[in-house]
């Protein structure tokens, strides 16, 4: 009887020990699980902290003064380029434009359901500098630019320091036409923007290895070189160029306004001659004779 | 939970890749102020090593991760798969940090679509980490 009691006591003690060991294992497992959850949470917090620091750095940088190497085009310049009197434009026609856009037969270039223009150039490029003046003027007849900056072409290239615009960072809105402007390099030749694969294909198709400026007008016309002699802009500031656009006797107006009329005529062939007031203007109709030439 | 995340990341990345090649300016996203998808997706930094669009790299990444987090892959006890999932998760988060740096510090604009992809990559990493450290949480469940 006494032996049975001792055996039962020993069994009970062993059972208790097993239960304690199991409880200890469960507790250890819970502690390990808590540690791991803590580790996961710590990793998540660390990643979010890194992201927070990056965003804080970006926010502090963006609050610094804007890049002064590309001052915003003044209201006076924009007003002058968009406000050339109709009489001046009509009397100039194609002006002294030496080469009109070439006719091409690509699929229509469109964006957002509208005929589209693709410009590819570089801020250092002197011929781009010359072409931007009539391009901005022509497009301003169909819509509105915002955020246009002023730059000058390379100081070490031909037609050095030609005053002009940069399409980098600018936006263009129009009900009838879309515009994409790519400035691939800065004045100093540093990389600035990159064309998409489709844009690159079009550019290389007409310029071989890729030269500036390139302008594709809705898949109907392309411009791959200077349209007028940039000498007329030599030594002039952006304000001086802009002010001369209204004077039909100035060489600047005959070149820039003339090319703007030619570009307008080319764009009108894709917009169904809309707006009519723009597309049927005498200067534009006269300049249309340069298309394909 | 990891599979829906990976599939969602893959779908968004494929869309961004399509837009990159077809019409970079057609993203339906505000283009004013800090939020400017077009500015981000057409910046020079949107292409890695001058040939690989970031969107395409993202699509390839999520394609690999999708394969790694399918139920058969989770059921497999191959150590290589566990390591690959962890490396993928860490690599994804590291890339997200770099891309947020580019958006915030270089381009000074945020792309909403890209941000959603970043959140997905981060969540995917945390889910993979949780599955590795807490076996009872893994995707076999």
Image: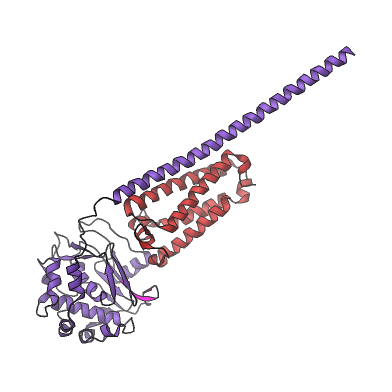
Chain colours: A purple, B red
Q: How many marks?
A: 0
Residue A50 left/right relative to A223: right
Between A12 and B85, the one lying in front of the other is A12
Residue A12 visible in the picture: yes
* Residue found at the far top of this picture: A2
**On screen, B76 above or below A165?**
above
Between A286 and A3, the one lying in front of the other is A3
* Residue found at the far right of this picture: A1
Residue span colored magenta: A108-117
Q: Residue at x 53, y 53 (%)?
A: B6
**On screen, A61 above or below A156?**
above
Residue A98 visible in the picture: no
Q: Indicate yes or no whether the magenta region holds residue A38.
A: no
**On screen, A267 above or below B10?**
below
Residue B117 placement (x, y as % from top left):
47, 54
Residue A102 placement (x, y as % from top left):
26, 79
Q: Residue at x 79, y 21 (%)?
A: A12
Residue A98 left/right relative to A16: left
Residue A231 left/right relative to B129: left
Q: Residue at x 48, y 55 (%)?
A: B60
Between A256 and A223, the one lying in front of the other is A256
Between B34 and A122, the one lying in front of the other is B34
Q: Quadrant of residue A31?
A: top right
Q: Quadrant of residue B79?
A: top right
- Main secondary structure found in the magenta portion: strand
Q: Indicate yes or no whether the magenta region holds residue A116.
A: yes
Residue A250 placement (x, y as % from top left):
9, 77
Q: Quadrant of residue A245?
A: bottom left
Residue A17 placement (x, y as % from top left):
73, 22
């Amino acid at each position: 009887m006494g032996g049975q009691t001792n055996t039962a006591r020993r069994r009970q003690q062993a059972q208790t020990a097993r239960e304690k060991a199991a409880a200890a294992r469960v507790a250890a497992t819970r502690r390990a699980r808590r540690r791991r959850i803590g580790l996961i949470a710590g990793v998540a917090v660390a990643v979010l902290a890194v992201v927070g620091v990056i965003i804080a750095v970006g926010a502090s940088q963006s609050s610094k003064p804007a890049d002064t190497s590309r001052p915003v085009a003044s209201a006076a310049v924009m007003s002058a380029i968009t406000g050339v009197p109709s009489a001046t434009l009509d009397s100039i026609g194609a002006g002294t434009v030496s080469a009109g856009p070439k006719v091409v037969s690509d699929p229509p270039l469109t964006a957002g359901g509208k005929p589209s223009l693709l410009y590819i150039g570089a801020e250092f490029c002197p011929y781009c500098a010359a072409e931007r003046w009539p391009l901005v003027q022509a497009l301003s007849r169909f819509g509105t630019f915002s955020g246009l900056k002023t730059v000058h072409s390379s100081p070490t290239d031909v037609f050095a320091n030609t005053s002009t615009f940069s399409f980098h960072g600018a936006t263009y809105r129009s009900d009838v036409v879309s515009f994409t402007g790519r400035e691939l390099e800065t004045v100093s030749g540093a990389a600035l923007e990159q064309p998409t694969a489709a844009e690159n294909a079009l550019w290389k198709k007409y310029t071989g290895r890729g030269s500036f400026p390139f302008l594709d007008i809705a898949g109907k016309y392309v411009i791959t070189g200077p349209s007028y002699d940039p000498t007329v802009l030599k030594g002039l500031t952006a304000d001086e160029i802009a002010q001369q656009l209204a004077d039909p006797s100035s060489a600047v107006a005959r070149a820039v306004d003339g090319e703007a009329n030619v570009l307008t005529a080319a764009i009108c062939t894709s917009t169904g001659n809309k707006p009519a007031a723009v597309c049927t203007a005498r200067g534009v109709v006269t300049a249309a004779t340069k298309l394909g030439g | 939970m990891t599979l829906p995340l990976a599939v969602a990341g893959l779908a968004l990345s494929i869309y961004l890749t399509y837009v990159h090649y077809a019409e970079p300016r057609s993203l339906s996203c505000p283009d004013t102020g800090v939020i400017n998808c077009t500015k981000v997706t057409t910046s020079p930094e949107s292409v890695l090593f001058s040939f690989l669009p970031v969107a395409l790299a993202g699509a390839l990444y999520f394609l690999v991760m999708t394969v790694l987090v399918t139920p058969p892959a989770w059921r497999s006890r191959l150590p290589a798969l566990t390591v690959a999932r962890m490396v993928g998760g860490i690599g994804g988060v590291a890339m997200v940090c770099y891309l947020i740096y580019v958006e915030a510090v270089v381009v000074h604009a945020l792309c909403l679509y890209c941000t959603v992809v970043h959140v997905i990559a981060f969540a995917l990493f945390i889910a993979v980490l949780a599955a590795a450290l807490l076996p009872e949480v893994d995707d076999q469940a």
